[in-house]
Amino acid sequence: MLFSRFSVTPLVLASAQAFAAVPAHQPDAKGFASITQPFIQQNCISCHGPKKQKGELRLDTLPNDFSDPTTAKKWAEVLNTVNSHEMPPEEEDQPTPESAGKFTDWLTSELGRAEIAKRSSGTVMRRLNRAEYNNTIRDLVGLDFDASESFPQDPPAGGFDNIGQALTVSPLHMELYYATARRILDRAIVTGEKPPTIRWHFEPEEHKDKSDGARIKRDGKDIILGKGSLPAENGFAVMHHAGWDRVVYARNLALANPGKYTIRFRAAGRIPTRAQVIEGAKVVLAQRRDQAIAKGSSREYQQGLYDADLKHFETHRMYDYGAPRVKVVTNIGGVPKVIAEMDINATEAEPQVYEVTADFTKQKSHIQFEYAYSIPSVLDRDWQIKPEFAAPLLLIDWFELEGPINTVWPPESTNRLVGDRSIADERERARKILENFMPRAFRRLVTKEEIESRLQMFDANRPKKPSFEEAIKVPLASVLTSPNFIYLIEPARTGDEKKLTPFEFASRLSYFLWSSMPDDSLFRLASSGELMKPDVVKAQIDRMLADPKSEALVQNFTGQWLGLRKVGSNPPVKNIYPEYDRHLEISIVRESEAFFEEILRNDLDSRNLIKSDFVTINERLARFYGIPGVKGDEFRRVKVSPESHRGGIVTQASIHSITSNGTRTSPISRGVWVLKTMLNTDPGLPVANAGELPSKVPGIGKATVRQRLNIHREAAACARCHDKIDPLGFALENFNAAGEWREIESSGWNGRQQPNDPKIDASATMPDGTKFVGVQGLQDELLKQQDKFLGGLSAKLHTYALGRELGFSDQPMVDASVAKMKSSHYTLRSLIQAIVASESFASK
């Protein structure tokens, strides 16, 4: 690791001193000669020996040096294929269960021993990822901060972005860390008199024409207030649909004081009934019909088109409207940012005041309110923007900007960092600040020498700085760029000394459940040593899961385990899936998070993740799923029947979206997802050119997805993997690429259904050959193999908790946690408790 331009000698020395004298892995030559080599000679040599090397793998010369990563990887592949009965091939003589078991047990043991030796040979230094950095600054400094604006994206490993091996640091990182620390401290430590609070009130009707806004003044400042071409009714600016000129705004805001401000607005909505939709549609469709007839089109044809399109408005569920929706956007220094999106449930008779907060600087800024309710243009006409057509109306009465918000002065962040102002001796005051700040930042006790080194920085800089506050920023910035802050350092130890210290354990626990630093309660328990008692740990887990900060566990774990972070990266295309909009995209992610959270917080059986009789949805998703009686944007538990085809994560639109390609479903991606996430099975890497279909296949253009993949599997090289992958994906074919239930596979233009389109064939097989049909059949089979799912869930949560990838030596730990889970009603809480109680969690 190179750190140009920065002195990192203490870091290098600390790392070197922490290396333990652990002996290297010593291969079991006797077992290799008596167990492995005879098995290879009898069962593998014909395909992987001197004459043939299928898959470029030769086993008779493969050494038993499991400490070599390349060699260990090849032996791991051998182990997996033998364990899964994929090798030897079915047509070859099979080894006896006894010899296969003896071979796999020995190989598992050797791979595990090598892993343990390697894991014990160096210092574990896991850098805080961006989410952890954000949360730690929030809890340490008292300042909301977004590290995504400062640091590059964290690379994942083992499925997660908190894996120490992948979280490297470059010279660029170090430069960014220092610049970011100074920016944080400049925002957190403020001096001088409390800035005056402004409260600028804006009435959109002040803008009376269609010019570029009305020029108004607030506190002597020139501001442009506008509502574009929006009509005004009863004092409200009325939004019928989205458009660049159909927004309410205040531009050219020049604020004298940066900080957090409240954006307050009074709004209401009108929600048309279905009857009003139909009447409005009749007007629009009649206009279109009559204009076409006047231009010479057939009256009979146009009337048929009128009747067909009117039926769409009479029957489609999208016209069972919800509340209108508003998007609040700021633009500061030319950078737009969506501050909030929300439904407006208030009526015109009783409008309500809504509030959001946003950070502003002294740069020129804008505030804008936009219409955010999406009504798809499924008929390829401009009917949805015609005023005659009934749509949810968003009514904006007025809006205000108030701030900067400072409930106390100086702000809490300043009070945390500048210490007791009553201490006259500045050096003593600086000492007190560092004695309070450094243990919390380093998440451990600090030495007098560490305090003294930062005090010397203060001494050297105080004569150069205009104030105490500016001088104290120098040692504080040094703390925030120290490896002791940036890393979770757990020095290597041997024997009983491998156990984490109470402070290290507190950090591992808090970054597992909160993605943040320990709070005062954990620090106190670590300081007293009480934290290492099992009953105390269990109580702390319950307390921490009840804290709102545990939302970080829900979002960060599910976002990566289920793949929710991929939602929107390749969204369903609008012309084929017109109902897919931003509100739906936000909702499908939150559904999966809320579902996991419901099971976690209420100690429900975790097998509900496989199949449940309830969903966690809001009104937007209820409309999309066709579930009646759900109103409002908040997520709640809703009981469903089997006929709804919902319940369990494999029925959720987030999963269907990320396992499709934007235009159509992908049974391959869905099958891989089911294998990995639900069956804890690695499908392996595809062979070269695996994605290519034969070029000139008759009828390929109109073939169903199943037919296309049947052609793909005709290639022997492809069939081996796809015979176990594709059928699992076929089971989910009733869900289209947006997650909507369907009975027919449409083949028409832009996904339109044609008269002879085939019904979905959701018949499928499990990897063991068991046949079933559809998503409910898949769920039933998954429940029969629940141990695979629970084992995978346990392994993934262990990986996330430990911040490292698991290996063969970790399997007993994973199995023990599953056993604990089964004995405790299959709850996620019991799995978390088992993980934290494990020897690996409490050890380096």
Image: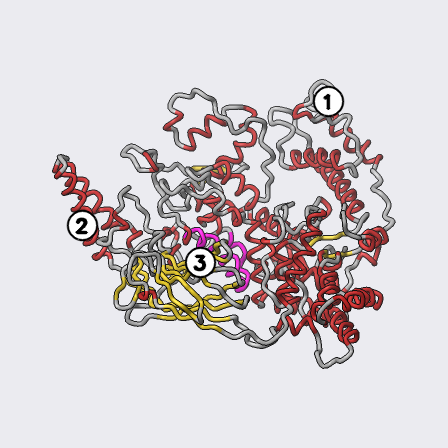
Q: Secondary structure at mark 1?
A: loop
Which span is picked out in magenta? 584-609
Identity, as a three-letter code, of the amino acid under mark 3 = Val
Q: Which of pointers 1 and 3 lies earlier in the amino acid sequence? A: 1
**Residue sitting at 84 percent across and 35 percent down?**
30
Residue 712 sits above or below residue 28 on the image:
above
Q: Give the residue pinned by disc 3.
A: 329
**Residue sitting at 55 percent across and 66 percent down?**
258
Mark 2 residue crowding within 10 angstroms, few (<14) / some (14–19) / many (20+): some
Residue 447 sits above or below residue 133 on the image:
below
Mark 2 vs mark 3: in front: 3
Mark 1 residue crowding within 10 angstroms, few (<14) / some (14–19) / many (20+): some
Using the image, tell me which numbered label, if any, was put on residue 282. Answer: 2
Mark 3 residue crowding within 10 angstroms, few (<14) / some (14–19) / many (20+): some
Magenta stretch: dominant SS?
Answer: helix
Decide if residue 189 is on the left or right side of residue 357: right
Identity, as a three-letter code, of the amino acid under mark 1 = Gly
Decide if residue 331 is on the left or right side of residue 432: left
Position of residue 649 measured from the top left corner of the image (x, y, whole percent): 49, 50
Q: Which of pointers 2 and 3 lies earlier in the amino acid sequence? A: 2
Mark 1 vs mark 3: in front: 3
Position of residue 281 measured from the top left corner of the image (x, y, whole percent): 21, 50
Decide if residue 50 is on the left or right side of residue 27: left
Which of the two residues, 196 or 351, is positioned nearer the viewer here?
196
Q: Secondary structure at mark 3?
A: strand
